[in-house]
Image: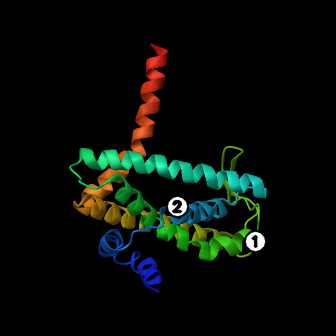
Amino acid sequence: MERLRDFASVLIRPAETMRHVLDAHARRLVLPLAIAASISAVLGERDREVSLLAGVLNVAVLVGLFYVFAAIAYAAGRFLGGTGAARDVRAALAWGLMPVICAMVWRLPLAIVRPGTMLIDVGDGGFHFSNAPAGGCLMMLLALAAELTVLAWTIIVSAHTVSEAHRFSWTRGLATIAMAAVAPVIIAIAALLTAMI
């Protein structure tokens, strides 16, 4: 019962909940949370029909990317003066994905009812809605607003949980997440520039 309380409270009090999880729980549920968030992300990708095998492979790749991102976030946090252990940062990032997991409330029914729905089609020189669900543009705008809310909520919750794991301010937690997100892009650009020389 305490776990369910933690799952709910991380959404509204992420720093306090994360401190409780880090101090009280030996099992931090990193892998199950990463898998659940990856399943939610795959369900949220409704622009094409995906076979079960492809869906499982997508989830596996996303879980692998989660662990890579967690390692980069650990290093970025240490660079910013954080003192958290790598396993604490992994746990913080996994718990920070709770808004994505909660998005399954509407992603799963939509995936069952309207599989393979392309929401926005880019072609013929512009954007247009394709295969819009009943309700047309209003439903599309509501879905977009919901997805943007989940994205913002995830960033905010993750910034607070990472800051608690590294024991610094939430703004440094936000900077840690930003650095971890940008680092692979910078490395790829540097590799391309080096290859061109």
Q: Which of the image's four quarters has the C terminus?
A: top left
SS for callout 2: helix
Residue 9: horizontal and vertical position, in percent? 39, 80
The location of residue 1, given as percent across then percent down, is 47, 86
- Local packing at callout 1 (Cα closer than 10 Å; few below 14, some 14-19, many 20+) is few
Q: Residue furthest front?
A: 26
The residue at the point 55 percent across, 49 percent down is 64
Amino acid under label 1? Answer: Ile
**Place of residue 163 in the rendered image (x, y in percent of width and height, measured from the top left):** 28, 61
Q: Which residue is mark 1?
A: 112
Measure the C-alpha gap from mark 2 to mark 1. Answer: 25 Å
Front residue of 178 and 8 = 8
Q: Nearer the viewer, residue 134 or 104?
A: 104
92 or 40: nearer the viewer: 92
**Residue sitting at 61 percent across and 49 percent down?**
61
Q: Residue at x 42, y 51 (%)?
A: 70
Residue indicated by mark 2: 31
Pointers 2 and 1 in contact (C-beta within 8 Å): no
Label number found at residue 135:
none
Earlier-in-chain disc, 2 versus 1 = 2
Q: Nearer the viewer, mark 2 or mark 1?
A: 2
- Relative placement, left or right, of 65 versus 120 is left
**Residue 50 seen anywhere in this rendered image of the structure:** no
Q: Is residue 9 left or right of residue 78?
A: right
Corner quadrant of residue 3: bottom left
Residue nearer the viewer, 96 or 189: 96
Q: Amino acid at mark 2?
A: Leu
Would residue 80 be found to the left or right of residue 152 on screen? left
Residue 85 appearing in the image: yes
What element does badge 1 sit on?
helix
**Which residue lies at the image location 24% right of the left edge and 53% below the top edge?**
82
